[in-house]
Amino acid sequence: MGIVQQTSFSSPLVGREAELARLTGVLERARSGEARAVLIAGDAGVGKTRTLDEVAGRAASAGTIVLTGHCVDLGDVGLPYLPFTEILGVLAADERFTAVLAAHPVADRLLGGDPDDGGGGGAGTRSRLRLFEGVAALLTELADIAPLLLVLEDLHWADQSSRDLLRFLLSRGVLQRPAGGAPGGRLAVFASYRADDLHRRHPLRPLLAELVRLPAVERLELRPLPDADVARLVRSLRDLPLPDTTVHRIVERAEGNAFYAEELVAATDTPAGGVPSGLADVLLIRFEQLSEIAQQVLRTAAVAGRRVGHDLLRDAVGLPEEELESALREAVERQLLVSGDGDAYSFRHALAREAVYADLLPGERARLHGAFARLLAARGRRSDSAAERAHHYRESHDLPEALAASLEAADHAQRVGAPAEELRHVETALDLWSAVDASARPAGPDAVTLTLRASAAAAHAGELHRAVSLTRSALAGLGQDADLELAARVRYTLAGNLLSVDNLSAAFAHSSDALGLIPAEPPSSTWVWAAATHVMAARQVGEYETALRVARRALRVAEDLGVTDARADLLISLTSLEGGNRSTPQGRERLLEARELARRAGNAPVEMRALFNLAIGCFESGDLDECLPWAAEGLDRARRSGLLSSPYPREMRYLRLLVQYTLGHWDECVRGAADTSGVLPAAGGHAIGPGLYVALARGDSGAAERARAMLEGPFDWMGTLVAGIVLTDAAALRGDAEEAVRWARSTVEALTDDAIPRPAVTVRLTALALSAVADTVVVLRGAGDAAGLRRWTDTAAELLEWARSSAGQGEDDRPQGPEGQAWLARAEAEGIRIAGSGPDPASWEKAVAGFAYGDAYERARCRLRLAEALLAADRREEAAAEADTVRREADRLGATLLRERLNDLVRRGRLTDATPTGDRASVLTARERDVLRLLALGRSNRQIGEELFISAKTASVHVSNILAKLAAASRTEAVAIAYRQGLVTPEPTTST
């Protein structure tokens, strides 16, 4: 019955779940006879039309009549009743409503263009009242035929007559409940308007104030989208993934506005920066409506930045106080500026400021920047204003002052623990360095030392590849007569940065050069740090004897010189080189000593290295609960020192998420991954890895695509590892052995450095690939395909050899801990399936026991294999018990793919739940009972999803769960069982 005029949107609706739920609730109440209205406010471009279109589409699918009228900006010559005539025109074009319209002459009056507004006199007023009552009667009759949704868009452009008619409909017409408690009309009115267009004297303001006081009218404000939702929107708008830095920049500039985000994405292919021309035109419309003086004030404010103090703006613009205040009031009323705390003004949106700034002439821009620079300098050279002064001096082309202020701003950023800002200011200083005469440069560092400082800031900010690039630049800048200590510092810093991006062989080469440049005698702190870096590099490439020898000697020198933080760093390295490693009590004692030394020295990076090793040591020993406090302490230390994006905190964030995933705290893991993904720069696999593992297990079809996107751009060791795990597992779950083996092999090869053996994750990747190979072999064996069997058996033998060598050679050449041994047990069990020597429950019991250290999901997956093996061995009761355990764990985790596989096994093996038949109703969740009711009515998965406002995929999963819980082989059988057991009752029928 529904008719709906939907706009064609190229972008998906992202976010707005709470708003959609609220509007849907209003529609539900309207369908039951409680007429309601919602006034929907939001800035231009925030998503009002997109949200209303989504709601209208859902309502129309449920049988609601949806009528949409648009108000249009026609200036002073607005057409009366324009949105209502549009609605009546749509009705008139639909022959189903011919009889209804014929019974209401008001339609002819409005469509004929003779509404008789009645500008004066009683007759005109009475005629207008009859028109209003006629529209109300028409809408009421339509609502008697079917539920009715009336959508009015852009009320800020509504003409006076339309506003008056809306006032009547909501206050005296369609929303009024009949006397005596009878049901009201099945009608809802959703009306949208731009909040940022409502200046103080806007004619819609008094009407809104009047309407929101009515009991049946509520107001809904569409606020800017959260950053995470804007990022999702941005990524969905392009077929090929955008770089993370581009996404974050667009998110930052869009400030939650969907339209702005879409325009900025569309402009990413254009070479010019700034605001896209089409968007700039939109943003400048309101600016051009201001008086000339107000435009002058806004241009000056745009040069100051997003925010400017009143006094500073007054001095820069040079206007009398009265004229300035009048201009500011005009800009505030037009909602271009907002007044804030501290006697300051801010642009309502950063892009509006960019558009106004771009509209300035080059000479005008330079002149105003110079004025602001001089005003700020005259107020005292406060360190917190150095960044502003540097910016204004640079844009006004006063380069010597810009260089001095940039270095001052970098010092301030370093003191307050802001490495990303320090990097920006130091790089600005480096850009200016060659353009400023040597005599005009500030006294202090040379260009190489400054570049070395920039590389340290980049590493602390998490810009690891940038840190490498900057240190290489410092190395290239060293002259033939360079100071040996500086030359050594550059080389061991480069080695440390190369270690952070897993370029291990190059790191070892540069650390060797650094150590060779500085003599050990006389002892120096530079030699100690060169030695400490060389120890780490030597250990990473397997040169354990060299690492141990250098570490012991350097530790003695560090103790003699009192270089406490270097001593701590060397103790951490020696933990894995002497005696007990970090997963043993002895190793932890040494790490605790190192942590205390680093803390005493105030060296946060070394302290965080000690805390990371304490945390990862607990993970490697299987003490997962003990791991979390150490990771939390390390992250807190990083937070307090402004180093959250540096390498060790990145590792600890990943480790914390991994422990949550492993222990089965999946909702907590997903929330943590979402929070972490906002850390800049994007932390890649460290931030989202475990969240992707959860998404894949829960049936998220986009998980594999997001994993593949992580392989774009510069090589990221952790990103490659995470992507490899997800893509290998995804292929195995699809039953695609070719893809699973290809991803496992390519990932291992990508993670293997020339100087080291295969990484520890090899055993996990091969076990995942072997599960797909085993499934394929079972099918081939049943088909009698001898050639296929030989091929896959040879592949399996190679993968098993990889798994065994990886599990036997983990950290520091020792066998891997409980996790690695559990994956090896799973790989061996899959190998037995491939060998085809008959069901072997014992191998799967060993795998289940292996994952008992804490990996809930992998233990459940092995239990499912165990149930298959027990069933094949005709041990049905044991198989049913294992299946029941898997069911409970899969439901707890929300592991939909595991549950689907279990349901398939239960059906194929005719296994029944351990729960007695009489308790089946209590086994079904509330959502499953809703799905079962609709299933009994013959609804498809798509129809079930629409009625319950869930996806068809989710509906399908619920149906599969119901079939398994009722031990039914089909939907029809499930419904029959449900009727038989009284889980659903027949719907009452009405006689006609």
Image: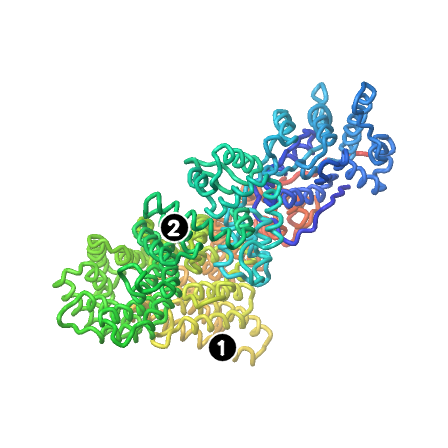
Q: Say if 535 sits above or below 255 in the image.
A: below
The residues tagged by marks 2 and 1 sit, at their Cα atoms, a distance apart of 70 Å
Crowdedness near tag 1: few (<14), some (14–19) or many (≥20) residues, C-alpha within 10 Å: some
Q: Which residue is mark 2?
A: 389
Q: With respect to residue 168, does 920 lie above or below?
A: below
Where does the image place residue 886, in percent across and percent down from the top left? 48, 54
Quadrant including the C terminus: top right
Q: On the image, which quarter does residue 480 sit in?
A: bottom left
Residue 29, quarter of picture? top right
Sequence-earlier tag: 2 or 1 = 2
- Which amino acid lies under the numbered mark 1 shown in the image of this protein? Thr
Q: Position of residue 857 (x, y in %)?
A: 45, 56
Residue on which the image places disc 1: 793
Please give the name of the residue rendered at 61% of the width and 27% of the height, measured from the top-left corner: 209
Residue 660 rendering spot, x and y as whole percentages: 40, 52
Q: Closer to the camera, 533 or 966? A: 533
Is 938 placed left or right of 389 in the picture? right
Whether residue 934 sits left or right of residue 797 in the image: it is: right
Q: Is residue 191 visible?
A: no
Q: Residue at x 50, y 34 (%)?
A: 325
Q: Amino acid at mark 2?
A: Arg
